[in-house]
Amino acid sequence: MAKIAFIGLGNMGGPMAVNLVKAGHDVTVFDLVPAAVQAAVAEGAQSADSAEAAATSKDFVISMLPAQQHVEGLYIDQAGLLDIVDKNTVIIDSSTIAAESAQRVAAEADKRGIKMVDAPVSGGVGGAKAGTLSFIVGGSAEAFEQVKPILEAMGKNIFHAGDSGAGQVAKVCNNMLLAILMAGTTEAIGMGVKNGLDPAVLSDIMSKSSGNNWALQVYNPYPGVMDTAPASNDYQGGFMVDLMAKDLGLAFDSAVKSRCSIPMGSMARNLFAMHAANGNGSLDFSSIQKMFADLD
Ligand code: NAD
């Protein structure tokens, strides 16, 4: 069993760290929010007073942070974990950040003889709790083989997308598609409801017809249709609008750099940016439904 430091115990990181504990690993956790640390300790993790203390003398350091400034801050700026971890520690960053940022941190790790992979995830909070996430890994084949057994304690599908940064490229493509599908799903349900349909009946019809997609299957955006979805919990928990807006910004930057046309992704980016600007940034991203239905 491995000695693992886990940094960042939010909606995703909290349940991911608990699954590592359940798999029998020796897990030391750190988060800026004490309540998040206490929740993991209650499930059998050990706490540390700082990221540095958590990461000392570990086989693996895993981070699950909001955005690239937090990741770069942790590894190379303020905390500078790359300067304190053992040379044989393998670093796994599962945050969704720009591929260039992941490559920058991995290159700094490489200069110090430390292996690092980007391993963003898909599957949402439900997948994090159930241990069924998809991990999309960017890094060397050797590093991939080392991290795979650890990731298998938290996920079902472990993909090797390519070299450093490739995990983030694939993740951003996926989330751009997810945003488009969620926005389209809420628009369709909104129109159905305004024309007299029951949202649950319409959702059932579309989930068994050609409009079927992940939102309809496990993450219905209309309140009351699916008990387990954030929509039925006042859009609390889940995947914040601000984080989806961040991912769509990453998609937009990537499209500009690679001279790709992303008309649907650009539309989705504008919709989620407007939704965030209207005060919904900390709600789950399925709350975009509010734009297309009179919910309040
Ligand atoms: P979150 O905001 O719920 O959690 C982030 C956690 O990081 C918070 O608890 C925060 O206190 C902590 N943190 C921030 N800076 C820190 C630091 N310097 N040291 C220690 N802890 C620090 O976010 P989340 O929903 O868990 O998402 C995390 C990442 O995973 C994001 O990059 C997001 O885009 C990605 N992601 C989220 C989902 C989802 O469904 N929520 C799905 C896939 C990927």
Image (cartoon, rainbow, N blue to C red):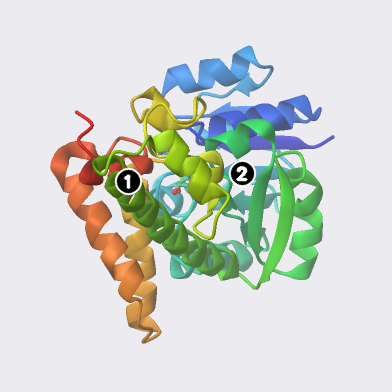
Q: Residue furthest bottom?
A: 259
Q: Is residue 68 above or below residue 162?
A: above
Image location (x, y in percent) of residue 141? 77, 69
**Residue at horizontal 65%, vertical 53%?**
135
Residue 94 in view: no
**Residue at horizontal 62%, vertical 66%?**
110
Q: Amino acid at mark 2?
A: Ile
Circle 2 sits on which residue?
A: 62
Q: CA distance from mark 1 to mark 2?
A: 44 Å
Mark 1 element type: helix
**In which quadrant is the C terminus drawn?**
top left
Q: Quadrant for ligand 1?
A: top left
Q: Is residue 51 left or right of residue 69?
A: right
Q: Is label 1 within 8 A of ligand 1 (CB to nearest ligand atom)?
A: no
Q: Is label 2 within 8 A of ligand 1 (CB to nearest ligand atom)?
A: no
Q: Which residue occupies the foreground of this view, 40 or 135?
A: 135
Circle 1 sits on which residue?
A: 192
Q: Is residue 196 above or below residue 118?
A: above
Crowd band around label 2 with a 10 angstrom C-alpha radius: few (<14), some (14–19), many (20+) = many
**Residue at horizontal 61%, vertical 55%?**
119
Image quadrant assignment for residue 100: bottom left
Image location (x, y in percent) of residue 288? 29, 45
Q: Amino acid at mark 1?
A: Gly
**In which quadrant is the N terminus drawn?**
top right
User: Sequence-wise, which precedes: disc 1 or disc 2?
Assistant: 2
Q: Is residue 81 left or right of residue 2?
A: left
Q: What's the mark number on residue 244?
A: none
Q: Is residue 89 above or below residue 20?
A: below
